[in-house]
Image (cartoon, rainbow, N blue to C red):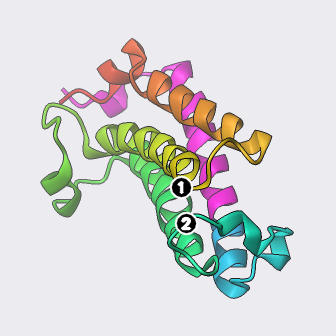
Amino acid sequence: MDNRSLPKPFALYILLLLLLALGAGGIYGGFLLTDDPSGNSLQMPASALEGSPFRDFLIPGMILLFFNGLLPLLIAYGLIVQPDWKWPEMLNIYPNRHWAWTFSLYCGIILGIWIGVQLLLLGPPHSPLQGIFALWGTVTVIFTMWPGVMRYFER
């Protein structure tokens, strides 16, 4: 049975909103950090990197741009269109579900890891945004695991 003919669960729309907003913010922040690795364009002092392996924000900006910018947008596209792409299936640990569903789960986990690494390298939270994004990652996982969403992406 093709689940695309089923009505989309409301929780899926919330998940899409989370992914689209994360992707837009990740592209914005990642682009600004790669364009201006000093961090000045986002009013981020270089001192925020003390204790980290980075001298400037270029590498963190590139990671942000890809993992919290482009990837969530690709996942949102995958959740909406459900393309039958073979390459993401190599990383799909849940073959009974569409790869985009699995990648949505990965996205929430990646966001949690992103914040965890920041806290590990930089110490206690430097911004309320860290708590917000930790919660964002958790909520992304929750809506991905929502029973109706899981059922919608079953094969």
Which mark is drawn over residue 121?
A: 1
Q: Position of residue 58 (x, y in %)?
A: 59, 81
Q: CA distance from mark 2 to mark 1?
A: 5 Å
- Dot 2 corresponds to which residue? 52
* Secondary structure of the residue carrying numbered label 2: loop
* Secondary structure of the residue carrying numbered label 1: helix
The residue lying toward the viewer, choosing from 60 and 11, is 60
Majority secondary structure of magenta residues: helix
| Residue 123, above or below 140 | below
Q: Are marks 2 and 1 in contact (CB under 8 Å)?
A: yes
Q: Which residues are magenta?
A: 1-26
Quadrant of the frame with the C terminus: top left
Circle 2: is it few (<14), some (14-19), or many (20+) Cα within 10 Å?
some
The residue under the point 33% across, 22% down is 150
The kind of residue on which mark 2 rests is: Ser
The residue under the point 68% across, 42% down is 130
Instruction: Answer with the quarter of the image where residue 65 lies.
Output: bottom right
The residue under the point 35% across, 29% down is 5
